Image (spheres, rainbow, N blue to C red):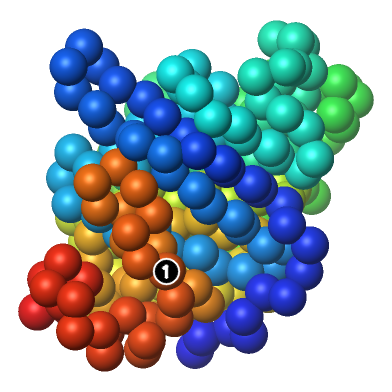
Amino acid sequence: MESKSGQGKEIVIIKGLKKSFGDNCVLDGFDMVLKEGENLVIMGKSGSGKSVMIKCLIGLEEPDDGSIEVMGKNISKLSQEALDELRTEVGFLFQGSALYDSMSVRENLEFPLRRHTKKFGVIEDTTSLVMEVLESVGLANTINLMPNELSGGMKRRIALARTLILKPKIILYDEPTTGLDPITSKEILMLMVSIQKKYNTSSLIITHDVDCARMISNRMILLIDGINYAEGTFESLAASTDPKVKAFFK
């Protein structure tokens, strides 16, 4: 199930990222590189800074120090307009799916198209685009359903379809299997691998799920004490004798 390790160019480069909230130092010089076409998993304990790092990456949090480049562009030097434009190339799958309850599946998927007309222009008939991504996640028959008619796993798939409709080059996954049963979790992971191959996306996956990391990662980073403490394949990290690393694989 695991896709081949990404050998493409460096599409995201984070160097020396630091972020504190009062006396609480969350990131203390974190480094990371995401390559084109790979699945990179970031693991860390609760409160280790995973979500803060993601927010810094997409410009929702301003780091105290360090640099972030996304597709060759320094995030801190972009105007708001340029940052908004760059964000259309970065899809985000929220932990809770974050569908709009008052909108049908079709309307949820059309929303980003109508919001980002600069990238796609004004699309009079969105049906073909909506059906394309629904078929990609195996839920073409849900187009007219409301979110409250969907199971948790279906909501996660629809949220992924909404992410795909903007055809992003990078997808950020925040705990993609949280709250799902083991069978549905495996289905979501298989779908993520399928999506990565079909759309040639670069994926950054934040998770605490060891099975998720084993099944989907080309490469892993363990975020410990605010830094990139250990990096490598799942197999190499699982075989480590370092107590801090071993604690993740018990």
SS category of the residue bearing label 1: strand
Percent x, y of residue 141: 53, 59
The answer to whether residue 121 is visible is: yes
Q: Position of residue 210 (x, y in %)?
A: 24, 73
Extreme right residue here? Answer: 121
Quadrant of residue 57 in the image?
A: top right
Residue 89 coordinates in the image, percent (x, y): 72, 39
- Report the quarter where the C terminus lies: bottom left
Counting every numbered tag in the picture gives: 1
Seen in the picture, residue 242 relative to 188 is either above or below; the reply is below
Q: Please state which of residues 77 and 225 is positioned toward the viewer in this rendering.
A: 225
Would residue 6 appear left or right of 97 to someone viewing this image?
right
Q: Which residue is at the front of the view, 240 or 55? A: 240
Left or right of 62 on screen, residue 120: right
Which residue in the protein does label 1 denote? 231
Label 1 crowd (10 A; few <14 / some 14-19 / many >=20): some
Determine the image quadrant of residue 163.
top right
Residue 183, position in %: x, y?
25, 78
Q: Residue at x 60, y 31 (%)?
A: 67
Which residue sits at x=67%, y=62%?
A: 35
User: Would residue 101 appear left or right of 103 to someone viewing this image?
Assistant: left
Q: What residue is drawn where x is 35% and y is 73%? A: 213
Left or right of 177, for residue 57: right
* Up/down of 2 relative to 15, above or below: below
Which of the 4 quarters of the picture holds residue 25?
Answer: top left
Q: What amino acid is at disc 1?
A: Glu
